[in-house]
Amino acid sequence: MPDVSRYMIRAALLWLLVGALSGVLILAEKSFALWPSLWLTLPLHIGSMIFGWMLQFVLAVAYWMLPKYRQEPLRGPVLPALAACWMFNTGMAAAAVGHLFPIAGPAYPQAGVLVFSGYLMASLSAAAFAILIFPRILSYRGTY
């Protein structure tokens, strides 16, 4: 398994832990009415489970399992894949922090900007990653 896939799967499992923890807090609040503002973690739960865990896990497995090139480097350049992995997780972390701002008290106008820029960064990095692995989907023709 390539290092990029290994890093992305580890990060995906961390996002699974974040999403599960926020889901547990929401369910505990629903059952025991501890702290009503815990419901504000619902967007964090949804974003971390769908994008942080599922999408990143799918991209990591796709990078590992798609057909390889015939010559070195077998999966294409590694540095853009590492940059996309780093950018994806940085964007998801920024969005997660933005989702947690309303819990701290009054509404912060920076929260929306942080969430938007985080998801934009994660989306652009996922698109860059898809562009990076797309040539490997094509059939073997020529010398690649």
Image: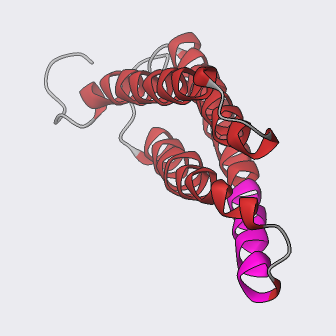
Task: Tell me if residue 74 can be seen.
Answer: no
Q: Is residue 126 above or below residue 72?
A: below
| Residue 32 placement: quadrant | bottom right
Residue at the front extreme? Answer: 106
The number of discs equals 0
How far from the left and from the top, in percent, is residue 101? 72, 36
Which residues, given as a range, are shown in magenta?
16-31
Colour scheme in the image?
secondary structure
Residue that appears at 43% across and 45% down: 62
Residue at the bottom extreme? Answer: 31
Q: Split into 4 quadrants, where in the image is the N terminus? A: top right
Left or right of 125 in this view: 40: right
Q: Split into 4 quadrants, where in the image is the C terminus? A: top left
Left or right of 120 in this view: 49: right
What is the chief secondary structure element of the magenta stretch?
helix
**Residue 27 is inside the magenta segment:** yes
Residue that appears at 62% across and 50% down: 44
| Residue 24 placement: quadrant | bottom right
Who is closer to the viewer here, 95 or 121? 95
How far from the left and from the top, in percent, is residue 12? 65, 49
Task: Tell me if residue 125 can be seen.
Answer: yes
Left or right of 35 in this view: 144: left
How far from the left and from the top, in percent, is residue 53? 59, 53
Who is closer to the viewer here, 54 or 109? 109
Residue that appears at 65% across and 24% down: 90
